Image: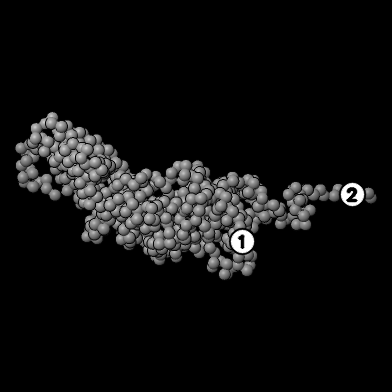
Amino acid sequence: MQVEEQPAPVRPEPPAEQAAAGEAGQEGPKAGKKRKVAMYLAYVGHGFQGMQRNPGARTIEDELFRALHRAGAISDANADENGFIKIHWMRAARTDKGVSAVGQVVSFKMVMEPEGMLERINAALPSQIRVFGYSRATNGFDSRKHCDKRRYEYVLPEWAFDPRRGQGRAAAVREASAAAAAEGAAAAAAEGGAQADGQGSVEQQAAAPAAVAQHAQTCTTAGAVGDAGAHAAAAVKAEPESLPAGAAATAAALGAAQEAAAEEEPGGTQDAGDVWVDGAAGGDTAGPAAAAAALPGATADGAFVFDDACTQRLTQILSIYEGTHNYHNFTVRKPASAPDVKRYILSFRCKGVFEINGERWVKMVVVGQSFMLHQIRKMVGMAVAVMRGTASEECMRLALKTSADLNTPMAPELGLFLDECFFDAYNKQWGELHSVLKLSDYQAEVDAFKAQHLYPHIAARDAEEGVNEAWLRTLNEANYRFRQWEEQVRVIRQGGGRRPAAPKGAGAAALIGGMETYGQEDHKRRLSGGGGGGRGLPPAKKARGDFGGRRGRIEQRAAAAAGAAAPAGPGQQAAIAAGEYSD
């Protein structure tokens, strides 16, 4: 019997990637296998909405994820919207909008073959994002949970610590007032000179200098005598006999008023060349040279130099943050009672001065376990306010210890960047299994990125846009009301309200300064159940729609306000007399 031969089974050819891997000596099934890695990268945060992925916004993670996919490190099956979950993606630090990094670490499962993966990844990334390398890690490694501490660096130009830089809104108002005062003083001086020439009576000539002096004294009270009195005094001292009798007396009165302004208002502002010396910053009103000499770091010629004494002073101020404190005033949308507002700062130091393109910059380095939104920027902003003399050290301590809502200043994001993430506990337990995770393995690349990309970007953007100069103009008493902080804390401890009252006549400055605090307070009230239909309130108060038993008093106050706005009739007057509208 003839037996038919069975055809040999046809085996499908392996994909081209597996065939290439087999030619390279690797087994086909293992080619393309995902492995957990820790990837080190750096980036300039300008133009990005932070590190963490945010749908609808341009973020560092989105750019990195797309580059990894194009390079072959992430397969097509894991490149969808759930890809971050599939490959166990996590970042060590969640930097804010505009904040840069040179020591960011991302953990995820990636395909490591074939060779040349690092070059392909960097080729697919924009120039402001660079990947230094990656190392194998355990399957359970999480770059956020296993990070013991993080080190951030903040840089500011040297002149930012000079109290004479950044005149602010109050100084601008005084400048306008000085111009008006100078115009009025010139008119008064002309009138006095005309009277001295015989165009008025003897009594008018005698009264003219006194009237001018009174006018100058009024301007002095407003802090606006300015250059008019100085020039008038100089004219009297230079050629007193060349002036008419009335004009000389007028000029002498203006000069005396200008000197009285310097003595009676040590918090005033005087012109010092192209800069203004704010008295609130500790300037001396005896003159520009004397004011400059009284400043920390001032030289004999009035220039400001951030020397060793300034470094020690700034380190002393920054060291107040060290230890465990309540940082609810150094972030947003966090009540003082929240458990996560307590953070531990290991160290905060000023590392001296270095140069960027010939300009001197001051470096501050902070090391902590973790940080909240805007925390470091607000810590730096408060420290700069104390260093410049705008606020006292007691204000910084009040912001750390009290449960009051204090509006702390926030420095720009330009000078802040993540310097390094540490994995000491992980390295101690698992470092011998694969490799120790440390940034020093890529130190040469880190230093090159700082010198070629990060530092030049910070200096160039500050020079073009004036970021730090604009911020310093808002760092003043009118916006933050530092002098009222201690009183506000005292009122709160006695059972008063948490929100500070705006000073009379503060206008837009007080509104702008307290805007962030008011937003925090409204958010805290919603979280605590103060609104939203009684959410968070006890059942007894939920069922009682009478504003917690205060409906009657609220109606009485509304009626009293309506009665005060319109003339009260006979019936209303009788009701008010009977006490029905009283509190």
Q: Which residue is drawn at the image coordinates 60% and 67% (left, top)?
A: 431
Q: Which residue is drawn at the image coordinates 39% and 63% (left, top)?
A: 316
> In the rendered image, which residue does mark 2 sit on?
5
Crowd tier of the residue under label 1, counting other residues whose Cα lies within 10 Å: few below 14, some 14–19, many 20 or above: few
SS class of the residue under badge 1?
helix
Quadrant for residue 433, please give it. bottom right
| Rendered location of residue 280, percent (x, y) | 29, 52
In this view of the protein, which residue sits in the foreground, 272 or 268? 272
| Rendered location of residue 203, percent (x, y) | 8, 36
Numbered label tally: 2
- Can residue 538 be seen? no
- 526 to the left or right of 371: left
Q: Is residue 236 above or below residue 293?
A: above
Crowd tier of the residue under label 2, counting other residues whose Cα lies within 10 Å: few below 14, some 14–19, many 20 or above: few
Q: Is residue 571 above or below residue 532?
A: above
Q: Nearer the viewer, mark 1 or mark 2?
A: 1
Quadrant for residue 172, please give it. top left
- Can residue 272 be seen? yes
Q: Which residue is drawn at the image coordinates 66% and 48% (left, top)?
A: 120
| Rendered location of residue 512, percent (x, y) | 32, 45
Amino acid type of the residue tagged 1 in the rendering: Asp
- Upstream in sequence: badge 1 or badge 2: 2
Q: Which residue is drawn at the image coordinates 54% and 67% (left, top)?
A: 424
> In the rendered image, which residue does mark 1 sit on?
441
